[in-house]
Image (tube, helix red, strand yellow):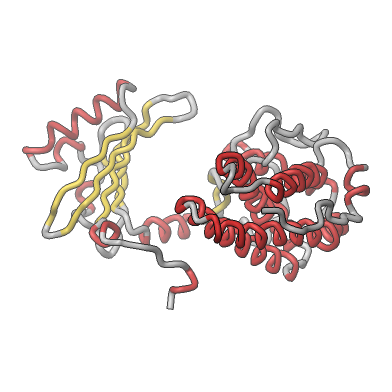
């Protein structure tokens, strides 16, 4: 299998990107582009039927492009949209999804060793990825350089690091960027321009919410939550419409030992003791309850110094989840 394709896509903006300082997010995108180009050449040259393992290794390395997609969608696009650019970001995201689908189809052909379909569809993937690199170079990246400010680019590193790169070695951060070794979002109080008001909000690990929003979030979660503090007192439960196990206000402030039936309380106390001692962090069970399958999980809560701060009990009716088969995609929602 040797496909006819342009092995070196014409990337006119690439020389400009190479002039950027080391660690600049856009320069890193072009370093990844070089890796993608190399993998496309290798993928084009290998015969899957004669050397499937070599082909499969190249294909698997190429699928790490998902990290690049996610970085663009969650890092680059929001900044471009902040400056009013939505057409390119929407179009590029759709392009990503098309390529994801092509890789998913190829993965199915790989599992079935369907070499005829592999030879057919790998060509579409190569052409699609070549086109992606050209669209990035001629439209997306020049537009991003026009829109984003220097401080915007410096803010990228933390989020990029959480998502990851295609490159084997982690890129260095742009000089002057605020990241150090790693700064967890809960400790990041850098002021950034946001598209919504921060009035009456609190800063959580991943963003800002008002107390009312937090209450609504917990109320509408399709999971029963009960929080027992480090003193074994129930301090919170969420009041969803369809709780598996009923709760009432009288439980607040009550010792957890009095909140469970006698036949199971010994197990609950053992879980709490193990969590407090640090010997366990999770426990899970599943039971049949009134004809439904209920999944029950306990999680130890600890602060940054790993001090024990209590237990969260989560219960969920998973009857419907267990019966799922095949797949239903977002586009099938109607």
Image position of 239 with respect to 203: above or below:
below
Foreground: 302 or 67?
Answer: 67
| x, y percent for residue 293 | 19, 54
Residue extending furthest toward the bottom: 334
Residue occupying image coordinates x 64% and y 40%: 164
Foreground: 15 or 204?
Answer: 15
| x, y percent for residue 249 | 23, 53
* Quarter of the view holding residue 122: bottom right
Residue occupying image coordinates x 55% and y 61%: 117
Foreground: 294 or 155?
Answer: 294
Image position of 289 with respect to 273: above or below:
below
* Quarter of the view holding residue 205: top right
* Quarter of the view holding residue 86: bottom right
Is residue 232 in sight in this rendering? yes
Image position of 245 with respect to 296: above or below:
below
Q: Is residue 240 left or right of residue 199?
A: left
Residue extending furthest toward the front: 50
Q: Is residue 226 left or right of residue 290?
A: right
| x, y percent for residue 20 | 89, 42
Residue occupying image coordinates x 68% and y 61%: 195
| x, y percent for residue 222 | 33, 59
Quadrant position of the C terminus in the picture:
bottom left
């Amino acid at each position: 299998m040797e496909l006819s394709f342009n092995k070196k896509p014409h990337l006119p903006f690439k020389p400009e990107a190479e002039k950027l300082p080391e660690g600049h997010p856009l320069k890193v995108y072009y370093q990844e582009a070089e890796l993608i180009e190399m993998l496309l050449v290798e993928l084009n040259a290998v015969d899957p039927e004669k050397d499937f393992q070599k082909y499969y290794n190249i294909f698997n390395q190429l699928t790490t492009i998902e990290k690049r997609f996610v970085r663009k969608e969650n890092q680059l696009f929001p900044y471009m949209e902040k400056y009013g650019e939505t057409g390119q970001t929407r179009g590029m995201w759709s392009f990503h999804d098309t390529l994801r689908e092509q890789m998913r189809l190829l993965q199915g052909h790989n599992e079935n060793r369907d070499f005829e379909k592999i030879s057919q569809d790998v060509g579409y993937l190569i052409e699609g990825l070549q086109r992606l690199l050209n669209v990035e170079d001629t439209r997306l990246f020049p537009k991003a350089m026009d829109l984003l400010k220097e401080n915007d680019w410096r803010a990228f590193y933390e989020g990029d690091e959480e998502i990851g790169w295609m490159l084997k070695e982690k890129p260095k951060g742009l000089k002057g960027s605020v990241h150090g070794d790693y700064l967890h979002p809960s400790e990041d109080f850098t002021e950034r321009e946001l598209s919504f008001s921060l009035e009456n909000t609190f800063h959580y690990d991943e963003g800002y919410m008002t107390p009312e929003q937090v209450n609504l979030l917990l109320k509408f979660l399709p999971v029963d939550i009960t929080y027992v503090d480090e003193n074994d007192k129930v301090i919170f439960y969420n009041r969803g419409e369809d709780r598996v196990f009923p709760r009432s206000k009288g439980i607040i402030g009550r010792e957890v030992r009095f909140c469970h039936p006698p036949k199971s309380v010994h197990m609950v106390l053992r879980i709490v003791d193990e969590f407090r001692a640090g010997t366990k962090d999770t426990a899970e069970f599943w039971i049949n309850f009134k004809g439904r399958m209920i999944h029950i999980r306990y999680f130890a809560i600890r602060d940054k110094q790993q001090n024990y701060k209590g237990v969260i009990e989560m219960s969920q009716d998973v009857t419907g989840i267990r019966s799922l088969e095949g797949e239903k995609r977002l586009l099938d929602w109607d």
